[in-house]
Image: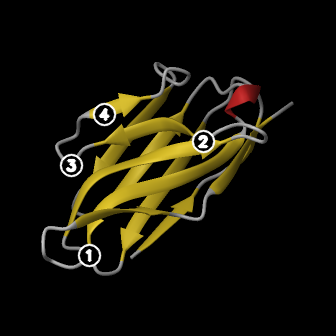
Amino acid sequence: VQLQASGGGLVQPGGSLRLSCAASGSIFGIKNMGWDRQGSGKTRELVATITREGNSLYGDSVTGRFTISRDNAKNTIDLVMNSLKSEDTAIYYCNANIDSSGRNYYTYHWGRGTQVTVSS
Protein backbone atom coordinates (compact mmCIF):
# COMPACT_ATOMS: atom_id res chain seq x y z
CA VAL A 1 0.00 0.00 0.00
CA GLN A 2 1.22 3.48 -0.87
CA LEU A 3 -0.10 6.91 -0.05
CA GLN A 4 1.10 9.57 -2.46
CA ALA A 5 0.59 13.18 -1.44
CA SER A 6 0.93 16.19 -3.70
CA GLY A 7 0.22 19.89 -3.75
CA GLY A 8 2.48 21.31 -1.09
CA GLY A 9 4.53 24.44 -1.63
CA LEU A 10 5.08 28.05 -0.68
CA VAL A 11 2.15 30.41 -0.25
CA GLN A 12 1.72 33.87 1.22
CA PRO A 13 -0.29 34.46 4.39
CA GLY A 14 -3.97 34.65 3.58
CA GLY A 15 -3.53 32.52 0.51
CA SER A 16 -4.91 29.11 -0.40
CA LEU A 17 -3.46 25.74 -1.26
CA ARG A 18 -4.88 22.33 -2.15
CA LEU A 19 -3.32 19.06 -1.06
CA SER A 20 -4.23 15.73 -2.62
CA CYS A 21 -3.53 12.19 -1.57
CA ALA A 22 -4.05 8.94 -3.46
CA ALA A 23 -3.96 5.46 -1.96
CA SER A 24 -2.81 2.60 -4.18
CA GLY A 25 -1.72 -1.00 -3.96
CA SER A 26 -3.48 -3.93 -2.30
CA ILE A 27 -6.66 -2.27 -1.05
CA PHE A 28 -9.81 -4.15 -0.09
CA GLY A 29 -11.35 -1.35 1.90
CA ILE A 30 -10.57 2.03 3.45
CA LYS A 31 -12.16 3.45 6.56
CA ASN A 32 -10.94 6.89 7.68
CA MET A 33 -8.59 8.95 5.55
CA GLY A 34 -7.05 12.20 6.62
CA TRP A 35 -4.17 14.52 7.24
CA ASP A 36 -2.03 15.35 10.17
CA ARG A 37 0.92 17.72 10.32
CA GLN A 38 4.09 18.45 12.19
CA GLY A 39 5.72 21.84 12.36
CA SER A 40 9.34 22.37 13.26
CA GLY A 41 9.78 21.77 16.98
CA LYS A 42 6.12 20.90 17.42
CA THR A 43 4.24 17.70 18.10
CA ARG A 44 2.23 16.05 15.35
CA GLU A 45 -1.39 17.17 15.33
CA LEU A 46 -4.63 16.28 13.63
CA VAL A 47 -5.56 18.45 10.68
CA ALA A 48 -8.63 16.69 9.31
CA THR A 49 -10.09 13.26 8.88
CA ILE A 50 -13.02 11.92 6.86
CA THR A 51 -14.95 8.66 6.98
CA ARG A 52 -15.98 6.72 3.89
CA GLU A 53 -19.51 8.00 4.54
CA GLY A 54 -18.21 11.56 4.24
CA ASN A 55 -18.29 12.62 7.87
CA SER A 56 -15.38 14.93 8.68
CA LEU A 57 -13.54 16.10 11.75
CA TYR A 58 -11.09 19.00 11.98
CA GLY A 59 -8.40 20.11 14.35
CA ASP A 60 -9.33 23.21 16.35
CA SER A 61 -6.69 25.36 14.69
CA VAL A 62 -7.99 24.75 11.15
CA THR A 63 -11.75 24.57 11.66
CA GLY A 64 -13.52 26.98 9.35
CA ARG A 65 -10.48 27.43 7.11
CA PHE A 66 -9.75 23.95 5.80
CA THR A 67 -12.07 21.56 3.99
CA ILE A 68 -11.47 17.87 3.42
CA SER A 69 -13.21 15.85 0.72
CA ARG A 70 -13.01 12.29 -0.51
CA ASP A 71 -13.56 10.23 -3.65
CA ASN A 72 -14.18 6.63 -2.61
CA ALA A 73 -14.07 5.33 -6.18
CA LYS A 74 -10.57 6.72 -6.68
CA ASN A 75 -9.29 6.22 -3.11
CA THR A 76 -8.31 9.87 -2.95
CA ILE A 77 -8.75 12.78 -0.59
CA ASP A 78 -8.27 16.50 -1.07
CA LEU A 79 -7.61 19.19 1.51
CA VAL A 80 -8.43 22.75 0.53
CA MET A 81 -6.65 25.18 2.82
CA ASN A 82 -7.84 28.79 2.88
CA SER A 83 -6.77 31.83 4.88
CA LEU A 84 -3.41 30.26 5.52
CA LYS A 85 -1.31 31.52 8.41
CA SER A 86 2.37 31.25 9.18
CA GLU A 87 1.55 28.78 11.94
CA ASP A 88 0.16 26.40 9.30
CA THR A 89 3.72 25.87 8.10
CA ALA A 90 4.46 22.18 8.56
CA ILE A 91 4.97 18.88 6.86
CA TYR A 92 1.55 17.44 6.07
CA TYR A 93 1.11 13.69 6.19
CA CYS A 94 -1.68 11.81 4.51
CA ASN A 95 -3.00 8.80 6.40
CA ALA A 96 -5.55 6.07 5.80
CA ASN A 97 -6.98 3.10 7.67
CA ILE A 98 -6.78 0.30 5.11
CA ASP A 99 -7.67 -3.37 4.80
CA SER A 100 -4.85 -4.66 2.60
CA SER A 101 -5.44 -8.36 3.20
CA GLY A 102 -9.10 -8.85 2.41
CA ARG A 103 -9.72 -10.23 5.90
CA ASN A 104 -11.42 -7.14 7.32
CA TYR A 105 -8.26 -6.28 9.27
CA TYR A 106 -7.53 -2.57 9.08
CA THR A 107 -4.24 -0.85 9.79
CA TYR A 108 -3.11 2.75 9.44
CA HIS A 109 -0.71 3.81 6.70
CA TRP A 110 1.04 7.13 6.21
CA GLY A 111 2.51 8.87 3.21
CA ARG A 112 5.92 10.50 3.19
CA GLY A 113 4.60 13.99 3.75
CA THR A 114 4.50 17.19 1.77
CA GLN A 115 5.90 20.53 2.90
CA VAL A 116 3.60 23.52 3.24
CA THR A 117 5.28 26.85 3.91
CA VAL A 118 3.27 29.99 4.61
CA SER A 119 5.50 33.02 4.37
CA SER A 120 5.68 36.44 2.77
> For the point 78% across and 42% down, which residue is it?
40
Give the number of the mark in front: 1 or 4: 1
State the residue position of label 2: 44
Residue 75 in sight from this viewpoint: no
* Quadrant containing the N terminus in the rendered view: bottom left
Q: Which mark is residue 8?
A: none
SS for tag 2? loop
Q: Tell me which label, 2 or 4, sits earlier in the chain.
A: 2
Determine crowd level at label 1: few under 14, some 14-19, many 20+ residues with C-alpha closer than 10 A.
some
Determine crowd level at label 2: few under 14, some 14-19, many 20+ residues with C-alpha closer than 10 A.
some
Q: Tell me which label, 2 or 1, sits earlier in the chain.
A: 2
> How far apart are the two marked residues, 4 and 3, measured between alpha carbons?
10 Å
Using the rendered view, name the quadrant where residue 76 is placed.
bottom left
The percent coordinates of residue 49 (x first, y second) are: 37, 40
> For the point 41% across and 47% down, which residue is it?
34
From this view, report whether residue 3 is shown above or below residue 95.
below
Q: Is residue 44 left or right of residue 12?
A: left
The percent coordinates of residue 112 (x first, y second) are: 59, 65
> How far apart are the two marked residues, 3 and 1, measured between alpha carbons?
16 Å
Q: Residue furthest left?
A: 103
Q: Tell me which label, 1 or 4, sits earlier in the chain.
A: 4
Q: Tell me which label, 2 or 3, sits earlier in the chain.
A: 2
Residue 22 in sight from this viewpoint: yes
SS for tag 1? loop
Looking at the rendered structure, the kind of residue marked 3 is Arg
> How far apart are the two marked residues, 2 and 4, measured between alpha carbons?
19 Å
Q: Is residue 58 left or right of residue 16?
A: left
Looking at the rendered structure, the kind of residue marked 2 is Arg
Q: Which mark is residue 56?
A: 4
State the residue position of label 3: 52
Q: Which mark is residue 100?
A: 1
